[in-house]
Amino acid sequence: MLCFRFFVSATAALSAFILSMSGYAQISDDVRVSSVGYPKDAAKIASVVGKTAGEFSVFTEEGTAVYSGTLVSGGSLGQADFSSVTDDGVYYVDVPEVGQSILFSISEDAMLMPFEAVMLGFYAWRSGIDIQFTWNGEQYAHAAGHLNDALIDFVNPEQAGTIVDATGGWYDAGDYGRYIVNSACALAPLLRAYEEMGDRLAQVQLSFIPETGGSIPDYLDEVKYNLDWMLKMQFDDGRVSHKLTPIEFADFVMPADDDLNRYISPWGSAATAGFTATMAEASRVFRPYDAAYADTLLSAAQLSYDYLVSHPDNVRADLSDFDNAQYSTDDWDDRIWAAAEMWETTGDADALSDFETRITNQPPDRFGNPPPYIDHNWDWGSMKNPGVFTYLASKRDGRNAGILQDLESAVLESADAIAAEAFNGAEGFGRGYDTRTYYWGSNGVVARSCMTLRRAADLTGDSKYLDACMQQIANLFGRNQYNRSYVTGVGLNPPLHPHCRRSEASGHPYPGYVVGGGQTSDDWQDDVESYETNEIAINWQGALAYALAQFLPEQIDIPVDTDSSQDTDSSAEDTDSLPPDTDTGSDGDTDSDSDTDSDSDTDTDTDTDGDTDSDSDSDSDSDSDTDSDSDSDSDSDSDTDSDTDSDSDTDSDADSTTDTDSDADGDSDTNDDDTDNTGVDSGGCGCQLKGSVPQRRTIFSILL
């Protein structure tokens, strides 16, 4: 069995001993840093609670001073900037009269371990296969579940009781549903990361996945697992089912023990547009590795895009038969994204015109104002940003110079606001949004801001934007109000009780998952019952993977370590003695087995189809708020708040409204469907698997 190795260089006890022998104060919760460390050339800033002026110093773990500086006031906190410390090593920050930070590493590959942990989270979310791995010395395993997905009763009532093959894909969140709208949102940053950082991501070895060692990079093999499921959700005419779920949420049981009937839902135009965009972009990414699969993806994208072009009305899926999370949203933003990806992939001038027409003629927001070109904070309910990023990054000819300039300006305006808040905001913890931007899943929004920041960095060459991105990562891994990591199994005192059925049913938190975070600046609860603040979801996960990918080393050459492991055994709750580099929780040797069988896919496909169009027309939603902005409702969505400056209306509104569950579930079900359906339709389903799953590569083992 292969072993994962943290970058921990000493046990908790040894680290505490080293610090105590240094003659300085004890570890203090008031000196807050990134508990997963920093890349060598990244911006490195600690937040100091209770002191805004005075000196600070940086020491090696052995107690040798390497840097001294002066605190700068940042909001109500002191800011200790030690970015000039770039040598590989393990360090701590000491602030006289306050204390010392935990130990943290500085190294070229500091972000590799957390990145691989996040990808492990995706693997463990796989539906339809046995899962087995070891993390930090602790074994995780569960049997394949949901092998009979799924019934088509609500798609084709004439064939009620018929099952078509819709197995595979990632579970959406803490529940076992799977949703096209949120899958598209999760894959947008994952695919964009590969387009921008493919040379690095191709080197990442995910030995826990069954396909490791094949001709497709491991990273893309994991992405492909969800793409393959999405392909099965496309109807024969190009429409795409909105989701696959039971009628109500499952109990807190393991996947194989969930015996609820599960159904393919009617189609929706937002799901169809998000599917189109995802498949079009994925076809570009996969073409160098598997041209036949890329053709399959592009054919699927073209079929759905053609349907959208010939059917311009917004159609919300009829989900009136379901009691659980919906991800219901209007389609105008998804159509912007779809047009951009189709143009970039095919060069189709009509698709370019479609994008440029739509981006310059967006529907007004709920207040009657024209929305900006870029949403400042955004999630699954507002997906135009990925389309804008694709348009700006394109090397194709034909773009309108005026539109191009306007979009570039909009990106820079948003990125500047994020950077300004990260470095000078009142909270002082590096977060790129102010206190009005807390709501369901806002940790995902924090990570996703790196997509805007990266585009600004590419447009200007200014390093401040990626420096601001690093502050978002640091915030998520401990430089925050709680002095804790928000990612299970990684970093300082991470969440132990995420709203996650596998974690709760197995009795230990599955690792690598970012939780949603508080809906205010101080109400996060590490409690399984707090789905509003402590759930996990693939859209937040994809955003964090993107952020971490920005700081992967250019060369990833990690030897496979089959036995030597470091058990640092420091219990997650015990942060006092925590020195190190992270651990927190279960610690030590993460050994991955990954033996887990693959495939699982039973391809029963009965192709039901038959376009029964039972058009229930129901305006299921009834909700008054027609907010074109796709969703006051949804959670993390936050209406995505376009307003760059986070300005008042800025949707802060957005979301205090926790209603939002649509999000990833939360069992809360407060379902969301806010705006009114422009036409609800159900249709025939011909779900077919397109593409196959290859085989592949090795492991991760990280050494200082």
Image (cartoon, rainbow, N blue to C red):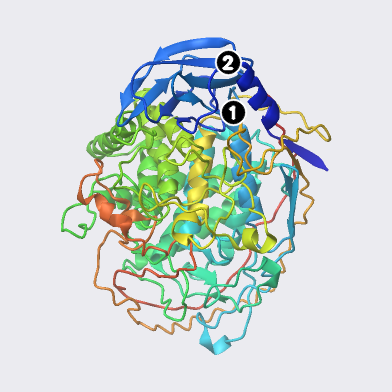
Q: Vertically, is 559 above or below 371?
A: above
Q: Which residue is mark 2?
A: 23
Quadrant in the picture for the N terminus: top right
- The x, y position of residue 603, in whole percent, is 70, 69
Q: Residue at x 46, y 81 (%)?
A: 321
Q: How would you rate the neighbour count of disc 2 (Cα within 10 Å): few for under 14, some for 14-19, many for 20 or more?
A: few
- The x, y position of residue 220, in whole percent, is 62, 45
- Depth-wise, is mark 2 or mark 1 nearer the camera? 2
- The x, y position of residue 450, in whole percent, is 42, 37
Q: Nearer the viewer, residue 658 or 239?
A: 658
Question: How many callouts does the rendering have?
Answer: 2
Q: Residue at x 39, y 40 (%)?
A: 449
Does residue 127 appear left or right of residue 297 in this picture? right
Q: Residue at x 36, y 77 (%)?
A: 680
Quadrant in the picture for the C terminus: top right
Residue 532, by quadrant, is bottom left
Q: Vertically, is 591 above or below 292?
A: above
The numbered mark at residue 110 is 1
Q: How would you rate the neighbour count of disc 1 (Cα within 10 Å): few for under 14, some for 14-19, many for 20 or more?
A: many
* Element type at mark 1: loop
User: In this view of the protein, can residue 191 be seen by the observer?
Assistant: no
Does residue 497 appear left or right of residue 271 in this picture? right
Distance in Å between CA atoms under marks 2 and 1 = 28 Å
Instruction: Kindly identify the amino acid type of the residue bearing the numbered disc 2.
Output: Gly
Q: Vertically, is 612 above or below 25?
A: below
Instruction: Kindly identify the amino acid type of the residue bearing the numbered disc 1.
Output: Ala
User: In this view of the protein, can residue 512 be seen by the observer?
Assistant: yes
